[in-house]
Amino acid sequence: MPPASVEAQPSTGAESAGSPQVVPASASLPAQTSGKARPLARSAFRALPPTTERAGRLHALATRLKAPGGAVEDPCLETGDAGCARSALTPFFTALDGLVQAPGTTPTVIAAFGNSLIAGDRIVDVVREELAAGFGGAGRGVLLVDRMAPYGGRGRTAAVSNGWQPRTLGELKAPPHPFGITGVYHLATENRARGRFKLEGEPRGTLWWKDVKGAGRLVVSVDGTVLARTEPREDGASRTTSFDLPAGAKWLDITAEGKGAIVQGVVLQKDEPGIVLDMLGVPSADATLYGRLEEDALKAQLQQRDPKLLLFFLGGNESKRLEWKRTDLPTVRQDLGALLRRARAAAPGSACMVVGPMDAVQDGHAKGKPLTQRPFLEAAIQAEREVALAEGCGFFDLYAAMGGAGSLARFNQAGFMHEDLVHPRGHGLDLLGQLVSDALLAGWVNEGAVPAPALTTSREAAVDTGASGQTAEAVP
């Protein structure tokens, strides 16, 4: 039986909550150039890549679902004589410039942390593929030795696995070991536990593993030939084993010699320019639970990945736990701020952006009756927005971009929500990914030419759909 999830239903009476507590925009936020355009020093070659066939279909779907999209709020971090010299997203936009102007041999890595909204990988698949269509792709990046649950696809895992137990930072009770940046580790439950990866021409790879007491060695082999063996010291540290892959290799095996070995992840990517997006989302995660990341592993692994953009898809679980009275707004603010500071300290050359939660409905909605907006949804969005800007990160209001209050109901009526009214499915997920990728690309093209958006509440930023009494369910 899998470990208990933090999404277990609240006890009787925990669902009751008061009216929405929307927090006003803070007057103490860092000064922005919200009324003044940045210097027009952006590169003249910046132009939107050609629209992909899928993007065209999703734009038509957005029109049908009244999802207007939106802009990234990109605060100015450093002013110059002519205006803003550096914004929150400048490191990422500069990396995209390099892919266009002078592509070298180094991929541009995006590290996407989050909850179950992205853990199925479909939203970030769209972001990854839309960016790769314009700037090239450089491989898969961080992978897992097995799935996080006994269901779902294997696009970001080994093609075949056996003998592993997943443990995640989203579990109700903290697992016995802390986590690296994947938020997951896989424990070998039998001798010869194995994960087999189909290679795609990668020249080298990296194994992230936990050096725990009593665990045997892990063996790295390609097409039956051993490339490396780990040498445990049993001191509990998170370690890295790198290996070169021979040209023409087809299959990579990670094998545990005995029970107890722990794998945190496997990195496979190419030595060429292009986009690599690491999907680091975990079901049931929130900023508080990301506190279970081990500091040494966070620093070492993010430094190895050297991301140019840190993405955080959070807020759905926070708003749900606010409704259940399992947390409060000061804690939401404090823990998100701590997560952003830790990640940025580990990757100081990276840009940073928080993506707020999608629309959400109140728990306990009666079947056949109008959906009621989750009481603390807009308060959570505003809190995340203010923390992101205060910490020098961009912010994208996914709730407003998908149409604000009532948008989940429209997604549901169109068949794009699961029965839990929490998780989108199919093209509903794809559309959310398209909204994020469109905003990033537009931010890159327009940097320096358009004033930063003025501070507003999420309600003010949302398009009036005439259905403010009906909403959608936020995603954990």
Image (spheres, grey):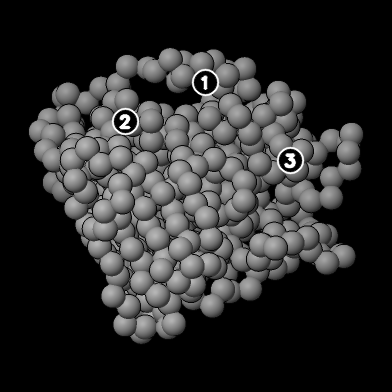
Q: Residue at x 16, y 48 (%)?
A: 80
Task: For marks 1 and 2, give the CA distance.
Answer: 17 Å
Residues at marks 3 and 1 touching, judged by CB atoms closer than 8 Å: no
Three-letter amino acid code at the position of disc 2: Ala
Closer to viewer: mark 3 or mark 2: 2
Of callouts 3 and 2, the N-terminal one: 2
- Residue 410 appears left or right of 258: right
Label 2 environment density (alpha carbons within 10 Å; few <14, some 14–19, many ≥20):
some
| Distance CA(mark 3)–CA(mark 1) | 21 Å
Q: Quadrant of the N terminus?
A: bottom right
Q: Secondary structure at mark 1?
A: helix
**Which tag, 3 or 1, sits closer to the chain's start?**
1
Q: Is residue 331 visible?
A: yes
Determine crowd level at label 3: few under 14, some 14-19, many 20+ residues with C-alpha closer than 10 A.
many
Please rate how many residues cluster around mark 1, counting C-alpha atoms within 10 Å: few if below 14, some from 14 to 19, many from 20. Answer: many
Q: As rendered, which of 252 and 331 lies closer to the eye?
A: 252
Image mark for residue 227: none
- Which residue is the site of mark 2? 132
Q: Position of residue 103 (x, y in %)?
A: 13, 34
The three-letter code of the residue at mark 3 reads Leu
Helix, strand or loop for disc 3: loop
Q: Where does the image place residue 111, in percent across and percent down from the top left?
A: 36, 50
Mark 3 sits on what residue? Answer: 421
In the displayed structure, 439 sits above or below 54; it is: below
- Tell me the residue that label 1 is attached to: 58
For image coordinates 31% across by 30% down, the residue present is 132
Q: Comparing marks 1 and 2, which lies closer to the viewer? A: 2
Can residue 25 be seen here? The reply is: no
Residue 405, horizontal then vertical, whole percent: 68, 36
Q: Nearer the viewer, residue 329 or 243?
A: 243
Where disc 2 sits, the SS reads: helix
Amino acid bearing label 1: Leu
